Image (cartoon, grey):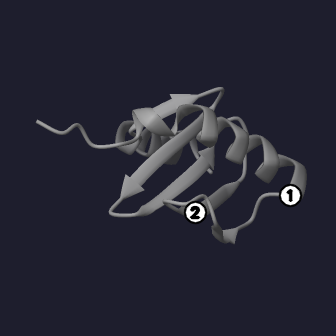
Amino acid sequence: MTEMQKFKVAQEAKIIVSGYAFVTKDDIITIVNLNKSDAHTCVINGRGEVLETCMDPIEQVIALKIWKENKEFLEEEIA
């Protein structure tokens, strides 16, 4: 993943925690590890179920733990 691609992901992210960018679209959350030179991503639904990933199992556990601890910040504000 190039620096420009990382920058684009970071701009689209709803939040970034510990180098993991969380990009949301509808009920789908894409988690991208910005600390890695290649694409390490995990796609989950709103319940935290992994739909697709290219992260190793330990990295998935870390990413999902960060998501669980911060998912309230990904929710849309209700006016």
35 in relation to 2, above or below: above
Query: Which residue occupies the foreground of this view, 66 or 31?
Result: 66
Which element carries disc 1, helix, strand or loop?
loop
* Rendered image quadrant of residue 55: bottom right
In this picture, residue 62 sits left or right of residue 50: right
Quadrant occupied by the C terminus: top left
**Which residue in the rendered view is the most extreme toward the bottom?**
51
Which element carries disc 2, helix, strand or loop?
strand
Q: Earlier in the sequence, mark 1 or mark 2?
A: 2
Where is mark 1, residue-wise? 56
38 in relation to 15, above or below: below
Where is mark 2, residue-wise? 44
- The disc at residue 11 is none
40 in relation to 78, above or below: below
In this picture, residue 26 sits left or right of residue 28: left
**At 66% from the left edge and 26% from the top edge, which residue is drawn?**
18
